[in-house]
Each structure stands twice: as C-alpha cells, then as structure tokens.
Image (tube, rainbow, N blue to C red):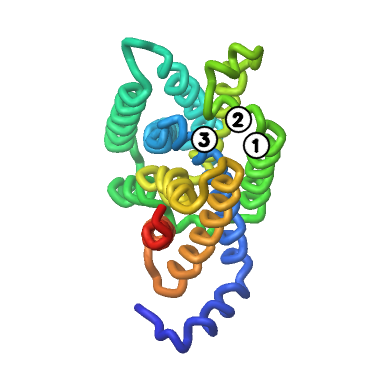
Amino acid sequence: MLISTSNFFANLSYYLSFPFVRYALIVSTLIALCASLLGVTLVLKRYSFIGDGLSHVAFGAIAIASVFNLTNNVWIVLPITIVAAVFILRSSRNTKVRGDAAIAMTSVSALALGYLLINVFSTSANVSGDVCSTLFGSTSLLTLTKGDVIFTVVLSSVVIITFVIMYNRIFAITFDENFAKASGMKTERYNLLIAIIIALIIVLGMKLVGSLLISALIVFPTLSAMRLIDNFKGVVICSGVTSVVCAFVGMILSMCFETPTGATIVAANLVVYLGFTIVSRIRGR
C-alpha cells in the first residue's frame, strides 16, 4: 500500500526507530560503497559483467549449501566465488578463451547447475520463491542480526582499507598493466587481490540486491561519475558517494512504499545516471 507524501517523514522516523532497519541501512551502504570502489577498476578494465558471472557462481554455491542443509552457507559460497574470480581474471590472458567468453561460460553453467540442484534436492516447499529471492534480493535483509552486521562491517572494512593502501598499485594495473609489470610490479599478485575483493563484494551484495542485480552496484555509480569527472581519484570518490546515497535512498523508499529492495536501489542508480547524463550534455561533455 502506497503512503502519502505528507506522511513520508513520519513513517521514516517510525521505521528508523527499529534496530533491524538501522542494521539494514548500515549493511546496504557499506556494500554499495565497496562495490563502487572496485567498480571503477572493473569498468576501465572492461570487466563490467564480472559481477553477473560471479553472482551466478555464488548462486550455484548457495544451491550446493542448501543440498547439505547448511544454515551458514558463507563458508562454502565465499571460497567457490573466489576461485571463480581468479579463473575469470586469469582467463583474460588466454588467447583461446577470452575474458568475456569465460564470464559467459562460467555464469551460465553455474546458474544452470544451481537451479538444477535446487529443484532436484531441495527440501523446501517453495522452490520458486527461494530462487526468486536469491536472484532478485531477499527480505531477509530486514531480519539481520547484530552478528550479521558485525560480519559485514569487518569484511567491508577489510575491502576499504585494502583499496586505500593499494590505491597506487590498483591505479597502475588499471590503466597500463604491461608497463606496471615491466617496471617490476607484481601484477599477478594484485590481480589476485582484486579477484578476492570482488568475490567478497559479490557474496555480501547478493543479500542486498540479488544475483541478477549485483552488477548494477558495480557499474552504475562508476558510469555516472565518469559522465562528469575525468580523473581516476575523482571518479572513485564520486562513485562511492553516489553509490552510498542511492543505496540509502533506495532502502528508505523500499520500506516506505513497500517495493522490492534490490530493484528500488537499482532504480535509484538508474535515475542518478540519467540525471548525470543530462547534466553532462548540458555542459557539452
């Protein structure tokens, strides 16, 4: 049921009085920030769709965990997603299977196998509902415990701190990996680090927007920032701010107007992208 504009702020204040709403806002903004930071590197290296590929791998890993009735599936999902990320990034150097083909192959295979396992071995009475919530985001975001929030804060902090410390090296391998390698930089090591960070972001973000929409958190903020800003650092900062604002606004709107959380956050990112595009055209960029 839609609410009137006059009651919006009253309802917002009411919702924020609940701890689980505050938990959801904290988790969503942290995930969005982490995704936007690595999104700049992925977009510039033409790996925008790696989010889709890895999220489908995570979906397959979740299916495996559900077969064994594991309540905490992160310890299965995370290692499998990391291995897939390493495989996809390294395949970009393979002349027979290029990066985009590797992403497509991995994505489709994992999605198909995951859906097959869920249908064959699932003990749930609502298989379609379970699959839909995994693909498009789940309302379980509003049932987060304090432990879930701490887990997300810790992993997000690791991602953000790692990005800040390795900023110059990530910048180097983003724009000219061959030159960085020739100058003595261990590019393979940093590519592996990026793969691990991406896998962490995907696993965290699936609960927020689902496996089919996670790439939006990676791509949209970066593309929006690149409409107005030319330098790498500026794009990173603008992308992070845009992503956090869109996640926060999307969460608030989804609660107040009872819309799907993941889809609302993606819609907010789309609106911002269109707005930035209009501004860039006005400025003649």
Front residue of 232/243: it is 232
Measured in 3D between alpha carbons, the distance from the residue under mark 1 to the one under mark 3, in whole angstroms, is 11 Å
Classify residue 104 by image quadrant: top left
The residue sitting at 53% across, 46% down in the picture is 36
260 sits to left or right of 225: left
In the picture of the structure, the residue carrying the numbered disc 3 is 41
SS label for mark 3: helix
Whether pointer 1 and pointer 3 mark residues with C-beta atoms closer than 8 Å, the reply is no
The residue sitting at 40% across, 85% down in the picture is 4
Give the x, y percent position of residue 155.
64, 41
Query: Of marks 3 and 2, which one's residue comes earlier in the chain?
Result: 3
Query: Of marks 1 and 2, which one's residue comes earlier in the chain?
Result: 1
Whether pointer 1 and pointer 2 mark residues with C-beta atoms closer than 8 Å, the reply is yes
Q: Nearer the viewer, mark 1 or mark 2?
A: 2
SS label for mark 2: helix
- Amino acid of disc 3: Thr
In the picture of the structure, the residue carrying the numbered disc 2 is 170
- Amino acid of disc 2: Ile
SS label for mark 1: helix
Give the x, y percent position of residue 196.
56, 28
Classify residue 56 by image quadrant: top left
The residue sitting at 39% across, 43% down in the picture is 211
Whether pointer 3 and pointer 2 mark residues with C-beta atoms closer than 8 Å, the reply is yes
Q: Residues within 10 Å of mark 2 (few under 14, many from 20)?
A: many
Measured in 3D between alpha carbons, the distance from the residue under mark 3 to the one under mark 2, in whole angstroms, is 8 Å
Q: Is residue 156 visible?
A: yes
How many numbered circles are shown? 3
In the picture of the structure, the residue carrying the numbered disc 1 is 163
